[in-house]
Image (cartoon, coloured by chain):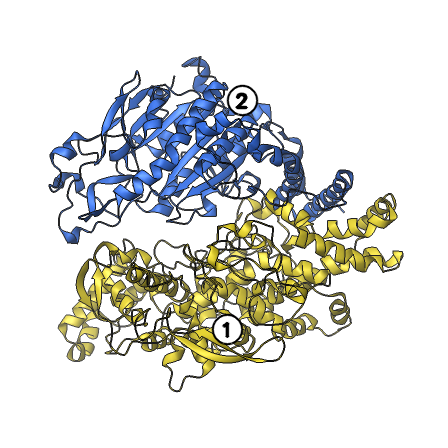
Chain colours: A blue, B yellow
Amino acid sequence: MTTHPLAEAWTRRHFLGRSAQGIGTAALASLLSPRGAGARSQSLPRAKHVIALFMSGGPSHVDLFDPKPELARRDGQPIPDELTKGVHFAQISRQSGKPKLKASPYHFQKHGQSGIPVSELLPHTAEIIDEIAVVRSLHSHVFNHDPAVTYLNTGHERVGRPTMGSWLSYGLGSENEDLPAFVVLTSGVKLQPLLDNYWSSGFLPTQHQGVEFRPAGDPVLHLRRPPGISKARRRTELDLIRWMNARHHRDFADPEILTRIQQYELAFRMQASVPELTDLSQETNETLALYGARPGERSYANNCLLARRLVERGVRFVQLYDMGWDAHESLVKDLPRQCRAIDRATAGLIKDLKRRGLLEETLILWGGEFGRTPVVEGAGRLWGRDHHPHGFTMWMAGGGIRRGTVYGATDPFGFHAEENPVAVHDFHATALHCLGVDHEALTYRFQGRDFRLTDVAGKVVPELLR
Amino acid sequence: MTAKGTKAWHLPFSLPTLYRAVMPRLGLRLVCALLGMAWASVNGEDAPHWAFSAPKAVPVPRTSPAANLRHPIDAFVWHRVKARGIALSPQADPDRLARRLSLDLRGLPVSPSERMAYQNDDSLNALDRLVDRWLASPFYGERMAQDWLDLARYADTTGHAADQPRTMWLFRDWVIDALNADMPYDQFTLEQLAGDRLPSASEAQQIATGFHRNSMQALGNNPRKEEFRVRGVVDRLDVTGQVWLGLSIACAECHDHTHDPISQKDYYGLFAIFNQVPHYGETFHVHGPRLTVSRKNAHGDTIAVDAQVMDTLLEPRPTFVHLRGNYEMRGERVLPGIPAVFDDGTEREWNRLSFAQWLIADEHPLTARVAVNRAWQQFFHHGLVRTANDFGKYGEAPSHPDLLDWMTRRFQSGGWSLKRLHRDFLTSTVYRQRSAFRTDLHEQDPKNRWLARAPRFRLTAETLRDQALAVSGLLVPTMGGPSVFPSQPEGVGQFRDATAGEWEESTGSDRFRRSLYTFWQRMAPHPAMTTFDAPTRETCTVTRSLTNTPLQALAMLNDPAMVEAQLAFAGHLDRLPHSARLEQAFLAALNRLPNTEEYAYWSALLLKQPADERAAILATVLLNLDEFLTRE
């Protein structure tokens, strides 16, 4: 039987071209920022890993990181017309009168040497504020959850493009062949479902999709070999599976077969690597307390600790989804609950990474798919805030990011990103830059076009870099 | 769309003639309106979205006899492919084709004796006969029901935090029976949406209305019970929209739809139709209407079972627009009705029955099209409209609009028979192509939209497990009845409410029933299902995602249930003479013989293994091959 030329090309790319470092060194070099050598000689990649803390549902910027005294002054007054021109609210209908401004019920205080104001709801985050670059001028146009999460992850609101974790898995590979390059951990109060496509590899080979660990109990099931089956025998079986699959690929040339081969090999290695990875009993009580982690529980805190252990072992991209931030109905009930669940652990993660020397090589991203409206939704005791993509806050910390800084600003009402607006593509470009990747060079040809995470836009924000 | 514009430019007579001819009858205003519409469509303004016009009568394209096409479907596909200068793929070899047919129609592999039978069938239409045989098999209804149960968000628990068990399996069995009996899809629709409102509704017709009792349900005399009731109505609308209209109308709950012509008022008109189901505290202190029916249990005793059915309040519940989607903030009162875009001006009293009758009217632009497209998705992996739940403006346009319209009209004129529709697909040349990827298509058509090869895709969670059970001889083909509890890893159900009860593992044959009978626990679904992308069924799923993860490899290799199948399969192989073992193993698992290369490689390799492990190695490897996990 002759070898299918296409099959051969694929096989070569998958088995020879991809070293333990992902795509070959030569290809990697071409991704590195071309501006790195000239304009910014010190911009060699600082970060090797990303921990993306995704507050699913949309955390309120005006109650957490973007204090607006003007809201307090004009509490209850209708929002000026010029702000809402052409704006579409998800829930607040314009039929029910003009939306009214709503002051934050929470107190802000300046913290650290940087003096960055942080809400009283995040006392632990306030302690590490000097490590953080707060970006107050994120903006997008997508105001519903699914497309907005998809936009934040893929740079496009329609499903089908690769997510940031997949791009990095594809571009940089994994530093640990025994674990997936892209791991997803979930926690929180389920208000909206988390969809598989939030960690999809889109048109990239499916081996780059995120692998979701189970939120409770054993993070990964079926790690133990069946009784009586030696490791050597399992190896023999896997070799046969591989031989048969590779042979089959020669006839069918379906890249899914190559992914299957790799996933079986990875599964074999995970049988050794995952039990060690997920054994939180190896951590001291002091570390557990730092995060507020309790082994065996379903929690964001445990996920943060697991995230540290994952990047420690070379995993490229860890994404934590914490659900429950969609505070439409009762912000004063929902927001403190969410903050309590994440605050200590988020700060603990940064402190822990720092003392282990990992913060320098780990980029931390925090934020949701949008912020929340400075105008009130509902009335009386039960009030909330609506989806708000026009101006919201995310923060970055760690590898390559300037410490203790605020970048950009919304208008006095916290409505539109006004000063130094940062588009989602800019945010992505900056994040990739921290990993030494030129966002314009990390491309994949699909249907005759080169696609990239930043689509046809994106500018690195130098003020966010160290 | 250019259809309208084309018509406007090709008027058979001059405008003044037309004016004189129709003016007296139609009146000036109407003519002006019609001309305005024509003008607008010529200019591309307000052209009606394709999906809101009834399917067109389209001729089957002429093809060359040399193309050797089997079915009119092929003509449509062949034309598009030929225009791009490429050819269809050749027919797959008979073994692979039989396996494809069997997995598609029955969700089970071909048994060695079945293979023998069709190999001995020398008639020219042997494969067609296989299609007919398997369409008539009771396994067909079980396989097709899997997909329908995703749409119906069928589950055995109520969902939400409490996630209590409830009796829904009578509905599941109704679906299997209806599909096996090839109940016409219009009737199938009518009975599920409004079976209880049919004159002298039979027991089965009432059970069919369990479709909309599958909504999640919070329990008890909950202080938020009205909120949860409203959520149930919202879910029914959402599901009805996706399943029958192919529209995601959910956004209009809170605001006018931003892209499709469904206003908030339209939405609440539909809401009013589904708002008439009695709730907790109204007429009874249970969660929704019940119908007590008698069934025989496994021991042959007659038992009473409470089926969840639909009913209608005697005193209609008034419906108001919920401002911002908040049920406590009442806007204007809305009467039951259909969205204005569909309104043909006929005066009707709108209720679930008239709504269902409106859906299945021949001139309805969406119902049949959406069903045909979803059926296409079942056998070709993607619909002709890839967004099978969204035919609206945000959905994808059909890849072969004429084919979709032609099939839709054929489906309707052929009595809405799903089996006939499936037979059309499966006897086509397009379906029978090889699924191997082709270099010449890789650049031009990476998503295989033109269908110049058959799709190749991983089997569903249910089929994967059923197949392993079938190959290993463990499968117990008993149909219907209460859901069963096959083994699952310890601790998986730990997040269930304590009152929901433990996962009490079934004993004996119930452990080996087909997967669609596994107890579907919404908040903690069986991991063998979710690992392979089965949904939680909290709400409806029209297209499952398809992942390829290391977790799946771990499950296939190490899940004790899979290991049990591997060992049982090995046990059968062990009892065979050495010379027959390899062939029989390949036949059972892959439905084909090993080729020379495989034969040589395996024979040599197995000889090197300890004699008592050879069969187990063979079994384990075959049940983990990509070829085994894939429908190709």
Residue A292 picture quarter: top left
Q: Nearer the viewer, residue B122 or B350?
A: B350
Q: Residue at x 47, y 62 (%)?
A: B157
Chain for numbered disc 2: A
Secondary structure beneath dot 1 equals helix
Residue at the disc numbered 2: A29
Residue B118 picture quarter: bottom right
Would you say B225 lies left or right of A446 here?
left
* Residue that sits furthest to the bottom in the current view: B200
> Whole-percent x and y of residue B125?
68, 73
Where is B324 relative to B29, above or below?
Answer: above
Where is B549 relative to B313, above or below?
Answer: above
- Circles 1 and 2, Cβ within 8 Å, touching? The answer is no
* Amino acid type, callout 2: Ala
> Whole-percent x and y of residue B174?
51, 74
The answer to whether residue B412 shows anywhere in this view is no
Q: Quadrant of the C terminus of chain B?
A: bottom right
Is the residue marked by circle 2 packed among few (<14), some (14-19), or many (20+) residues within 10 Å? few
Residue B582 picture quarter: bottom right
The answer to whether residue B319 shows anywhere in this view is yes
Q: State how many labels appear.
A: 2
* Amino acid type, callout 1: Leu
Q: Nearer the viewer, residue A140 or B423?
A: A140
> Whole-percent x and y of residue B549?
58, 44
Q: Quadrant of the N terminus of chain B?
A: bottom left
Would you say A59 lies left or right of B591 here?
left
> Whole-percent x and y of residue A373?
23, 41
In this rendering, which labeled residue sits more in front, label 1 or label 2?
1
Is the residue marked by circle 1 packed among few (<14), some (14-19), or many (20+) residues within 10 Å? many
Secondary structure beneath dot 2 equals helix
Residue at the disc numbered 1: B170
